[in-house]
């Protein structure tokens, strides 16, 4: 399931609830074409992988979270495991996204 983050407290709570699972944070904007293109792929991955948590962060709604992770382009995917950032991906590259999910689970 994909969770749309409401604010920084919600974000921190979702990271805590994820436990040992890999968390993929999708920093997106509603006006971003590539973001809309990759969204269904991320949705599908979240449905088929039990050990994956997907959080969507709208950079215009949650500017504080975007600043915390120094987001400069959309989409940017931050991979977090046990509260620590393990890697990131900038851009709507579906194959690379799947590869990073597989190698960091």
Image (tube, grey):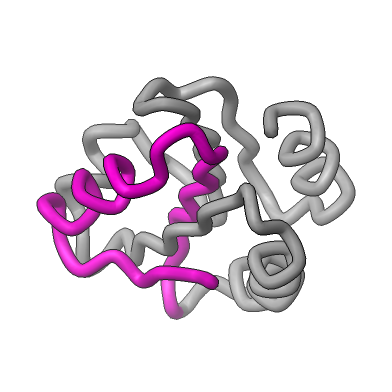
Q: Is residue 81 magenta?
A: no
Give the residue displayed 73% in from the left and 40% down from the top. 101
Q: Is there any visible trace of residue 54 in the rendered image? A: yes
Q: Is there any visible trace of residue 34 in the rendered image? A: no
Q: Is residue 4 above or below residue 102?
A: below
- Is the C terminus in the top left, top right, bottom left or bottom right quadrant? top right
Residue 69 in the image: state x and y as whole percent: 33, 33
What range is drawn magenta here?
1-30
Residue 23 in the image: state x and y as whole percent: 50, 43
On the picture, is 43 further left or further right than 2? right
Q: Is residue 53 above or below residue 105?
A: below
Q: Residue 19 lies in what quarter of the image?
A: top left
Q: Nearer the viewer, residue 6 or 15?
A: 15
Give the residue displayed 41% in from the left and 26% down from the top. 82
Q: Nearer the viewer, residue 78 or 73?
A: 78
- Is the N terminus in the top left, top right, bottom left or bottom right quadrant? bottom right
Give the residue displayed 21% in from the left and 44% down from the top. 12
Q: Nearer the viewer, residue 19 or 66?
A: 19
On the picture, is 46 further left or further right than 30? right
Q: Is residue 22 magenta?
A: yes
């Amino acid at each position: 399931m994909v969770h749309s983050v409401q604010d920084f407290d919600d974000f921190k709570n979702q990271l805590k609830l994820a436990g040992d699972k890999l968390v993929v944070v999708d920093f997106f904007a509603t006006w971003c074409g590539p973001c809309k293109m990759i969204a269904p792929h991320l949705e599908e991955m979240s449905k088929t992988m039990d050990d994956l948590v997907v959080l969507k962060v709208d950079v215009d709604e949650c500017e504080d979270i975007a600043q915390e992770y120094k987001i400069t382009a959309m989409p940017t995917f931050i991979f977090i495991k046990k509260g620590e950032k393990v890697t990131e991906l900038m851009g709507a590259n579906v194959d690379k996204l799947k590869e990073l999910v597989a190698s960091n689970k």
